Structure formats: C-alpha cells, structure tokens
Image (cartoon, grey):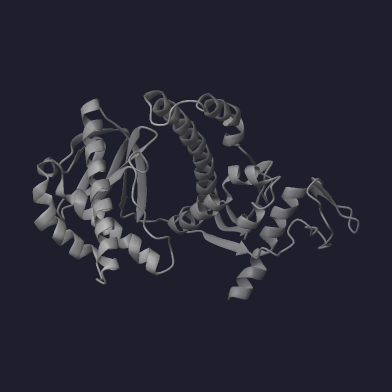
Amino acid sequence: MKSIRTKLKLNNQQKTLMAQHAGYSRWCYNWGLSLWNAAYIHGYKPNARKLREVFTNQTKPLYPWMKNLSSKVYQYAFINLGEAFKRFFKGLGKYPKFKKKGKHDSFTIDNCGKPIELNGWNHKLPFIGMVKTYEPIEATTKKITISRQAGDWYLSCSYEFHSHTTPKKTDVIGVDLGVKTLATLSDGQVFESVKPLQKFEAKLSRLQYLNRHKEVGSANWKKAQQKIARLHRKVANIRKDALHKLTTYLAKNHGRVSIEDLNVSGMLSNHKLAKSIADQGFYEFRRQLEYKCKWYGSELVVVDRFFPSSKTCSRCGHVQDMPLHLRTYDCPECGLSIDRDLNASINLRNAVGSVVNACG
C-alpha cells in the first residue's frame, strides 16, 4: 500500500462544508467517549459497535442537522474511538481524550464499498461533490480522510502500489548522518543540511512575541495562531522534501544501503545539540528509507549502534577517540587523513559484509 496526501483547492462554500463534517466527526467522537466512560463506571463493557447502534437509533433522530451531512462520518468516528481504546488496552497509547475544535480537525468517508476513483485535477468525492487539487492524482482507494492544517484542507488516502526493482548504479553504499551535513555517502557525495528551523527561527520567535498580549480566543489571536501554524508547516515541509529526495535517491540507485542504528532519543538528551538533531529528522529518514527500499528492490542494512564507525580508520582499522570538534580523521598508524563523516560512511559500507554474514 502507498499513501498520498495533497492540498485541496476549495472555495468558501466547500471550506464551510468541510468544517461542518469535521465538527460532526468531533461531536460524535466526544459523545461516544463520554458514553463509554459512563458505561464503564457503571460496570458495563462498551464497544464501538454498541455505541454506534445507540447513536443511530436514539441520539441521531434528536438532531435534524445531522441529516444534511454524510452518515459515513459518524460511523468512522466510532471506529476511530474503538481503535483508540484498542491501542490503549495493548499499551500502545494513552487513554483517549476529548477532541477540541481547531486541533486535528478531520473526518473520513467512503463510497459504500465501491472504489473511489481519483483521476487528474478534479475529483468527485462521495457526498462532498467535486473538489480540485493543486497536483494531479491517479489512484483508486476505498476511503479518504480530509484534514485541516494551518487553515488549509488536505486529502489523504492509501491505494495499492505495485513495487518494481530499479537498475542500481552501486551495489553497496554507506550513509553517515550528521548535524553540519545531512548525509555523507561512502562514494564522496555530500547532501547539505537544509536546517529549516534554524532559517525561520527568528521569524517564528517574532510571531510568537507579537502574540504574547493578545486575548486568547479573540479574532486577532486566531489570526496570529494561524500565521504561526503556517510557518511551522513550512518548516516541516522543507524538512520532509529534503528527506524524501535523499531517501528516494538512495533506494533507487543502490542495491544495499548501510546506515547506523542511531539512538535518537539518547542523542536528544544532549541539550547543546538537541535542537540541531531534531531539525535534521533522523527518525523520519530511517522510516522513509525502510519502505522505499522495499518499493525499489533495495536492501537496508542497519549496523549496530555501538559499532565505532567514526573512531575506526577506514584503511587499516586502527581505533582512536574522536571528539566532536575534530572534523578530520588523522590515523597515526597508516597516515590516512580523511574527512570524519566520509571515513564513517566508508566504515558503514565495509561493515555490510559482516552484518549480512552474521544474519545469514
């Protein structure tokens, strides 16, 4: 399965319709959570199916405005509530909370079991009608989710994707992630870091400073909050774009991609580098690389996090301490002088054979 998410081009009437459906989904979710809590207190064992039956037969007829909105919205609201409780009981998430207006507004609809065809720039959605996107989409899906972020609406869905193996330029490549540079490859290529948060940090701080005395909930406060949210979205989009380009290049053109099993949470405990590390998106890099290697017929090799890739000489194997301020590896044994990150990436490439043999 492959997922896509794209921005919708809506007029004011369509935006109002989307907001109404999102509010309908939020209302049903909160109603179901409230009833679930009450039933649990009185010794009952509720589930999503029972809640939906009570809502359909007793509660929905009391609210005529619900007839003007898609009935699929409340059905998926109860499904999502049931999934939230399943994750909680399995220890995978926290206890479900009530949803608030303006935070993570979204709703899901389907076509009553029939596939939804998305072709080109204009798309006919069940009950919603025709909507436009800023980019063409070719997909057949069973359901779609529409969500709001920073005042704009987005369409997301999953569809079947037939993976294919692409021709490889290199059999094995080592990738060393860093703070000053996003990635250094063992063949000498360097992908510079975009550092989106660092670029817009001053502007973000200014917007937050100007918003400090505005009354919470006022019109001016909402406008300021939307400006801040849009800037956060811009920062996230720049970071994701850089990571997508890098991971796609690695997965398409290399048979085996060797990376280090980084302890990201431990690295973030370093208060001097935490902001720079978070700005790079190391976890997102590995997540994207994992599924893209499957798409394009590549193999992802993860080297143990305790492997001394930065401390080992890539020529003779000599190991020495390498503080972070040293950017060049100078080997006293063989005389090799090489960039620190390039040396680490070559060691990660050379470690592929031992990792594969150990697994085999």
- In the image, is residue 294 above or below residue 216? below
Residue at 36% across, 57% down: 96
Q: Count of labels shown?
A: 0
In the picture, which quadrant includes the C terminus?
bottom right
In the picture, which quadrant includes the N terminus?
bottom left
Give the farthest residue toward the front. Answer: 42
Q: Please provide percent x and percent y for residue 250.
A: 55, 50
Task: Examine the rendering and report whether any part of residue 183 can be seen.
Answer: no
Q: Please provide percent x and percent y for residue 303.
A: 64, 63
Task: Examine the rendering and report whether any part of residue 236 can be seen.
Answer: yes
Report whether 234 appears left or right of 318. left
Q: Please provide percent x and percent y for residue 236.
A: 50, 39
Q: Please provide percent x and percent y for residue 55.
A: 15, 56
Report whether 74 appears left or right of 160. left
In which image quadrant can residue 122 be found?
top left
Nearer to me, 282 or 313: 282
Report whether 229 appears left or right of 243. left
In which image quadrant can residue 69 be found?
top left
Nearer to me, 65 or 204: 65
Nearer to me, 121 or 129: 129
- In the image, is residue 281 above or below residue 235? below
Report whether 226 appears left or right of 127. right
